[in-house]
Amino acid sequence: MADPNELREKGLRLTPQRELVLAAVRELGHSTPEEVAEKVRLTHPGINLSTVYRNLETLENVGLVQHTHLGHGGATYHAAEEITHLHLVCGICGSVGDAPIDAAANFVNTLADDYGFKTDVSHFAIYGTCATCTEKL
Amino acid sequence: MADPNELREKGLRLTPQRELVLAAVRELGHSTPEEVAEKVRLTHPGINLSTVYRNLETLENVGLVQHTHLGHGGATYHAAEEITHLHLVCGICGSVGDAPIDAAANFVNTLADDYGFKTDVSHFAIYGTCATCTEKL
DNA sequence: AATGTAATTGCAAAAGTTTTCAACTTTAAC
DNA sequence: GTTAAAGTTGAAAACTTTTGCAATTACATT
Ligand SMILES: [Mn+2]
Ligand SMILES: [Mn+2]
Ligand SMILES: [Zn+2]
Ligand SMILES: [Zn+2]
């Protein structure tokens, strides 16, 4: 469960739904809104899906939650305090591999130096073909 | 308009709808399915939106069209022969800047060498904060 | 030119996500 | 503990994208 104060400190009201959404994201790691809803329903069966969507967005606005895009479709959410890494998504088999953020350090620096662009390299996945699928070609 | 032969060569049937969808993507550059549909409707008013979605997917399967993700939401489509570049998307103002693919060459090589991962660096946009928005902070 | 087959289309329904709005809670002030 | 103001919720509607299916169309064969 989430500490009551941490939500109030962010200027948010403390509702059971909001508290549970945050707790669910923290326990689940990467998760879709639907998965968060399922988790929340264990203790609060009546929660509306739109309440989950809205709270994920609200919690993201105050920096407690973040979203990333792993596939072609919707976003997945995770707690902001989770250490982030790169996601290597294979377009053939769908696997999601991890790589340390450092792997992109030079790239990030290049974009900063040449374009003044500050990159959040883990917001979108890195898309391509994994080693296993490459071998099979 | 698309050359009849190029569609048949890919094993696809030549329908007015398909021909027009391909032509629209080529003329529009980056475009959403809805924008493609609008364009097609100029000459083929009755076309169904799902036909547009399906043809975009089909044309992508045979390599005539590609999609990328520029924002949090749906994909945008472009002709496969368009030279690709990196998309630098600003999460604050929404601007979409371009950078040459080479800017990511070292990064791509690192992922290949260390993880055996072959990166398609323009499938997802590069997300972050643009120079203009950074100054304003 | 007529025929058969399989791909494609339109339409309707489903699935996924966002928005609107009245009713209900939370919170701060009294 | 009441009260008032502002934020939040559930329910329904709107929007976006995908899927199922019967009717139509493109294409190869005769
Ligand atoms: Mn995609
Ligand atoms: Mn996003
Ligand atoms: Zn793979
Ligand atoms: Zn910007």
Image: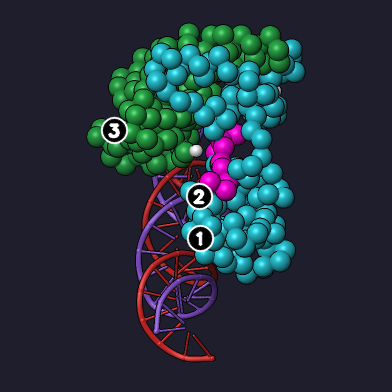
Chain colours: A cyan, B green, C purple, D red
Sequence order check, earlier mark of 1 and 2? 1
Residue A80 is inside the magenta segment: no
Residue matched to label 1: A12
Are the residues at dot 1 and dot 2 in contact (C-beta closer than 8 Å)? yes
Where the C terminus of chain B falls, by quadrant? top left
Residue D4 relative to residue A104: left or right? left
Start-end of magenta stretch: A62-73
Establish if A19 lies above or below D19. Answer: below
To which chain does the residue with label 3 belong?
Answer: B
Q: Is mark 2 within 8 Å of ligand 2?
A: no
Q: Is residue D21 left or right of residue B100?
A: right
The chain that hosts pointer 2 is A
Mark 3: amino acid: Lys
Asked whether, in this view, residue B117 is left or right of residue A106, the answer is right
- Distance between the Cα atoms at labels 2 and 3? 40 Å
Q: Position of residue B110 (x, y in %)?
A: 64, 11
Q: Quadrant of residue B111?
A: top right
Residue nearest the observer in this picture, A63 or B97 = A63
Residue B91 horizontal side relative to residue D30, left or right: left
The residue where tag 2 is placed is: A62
Q: Which residue is mark 3?
A: B39
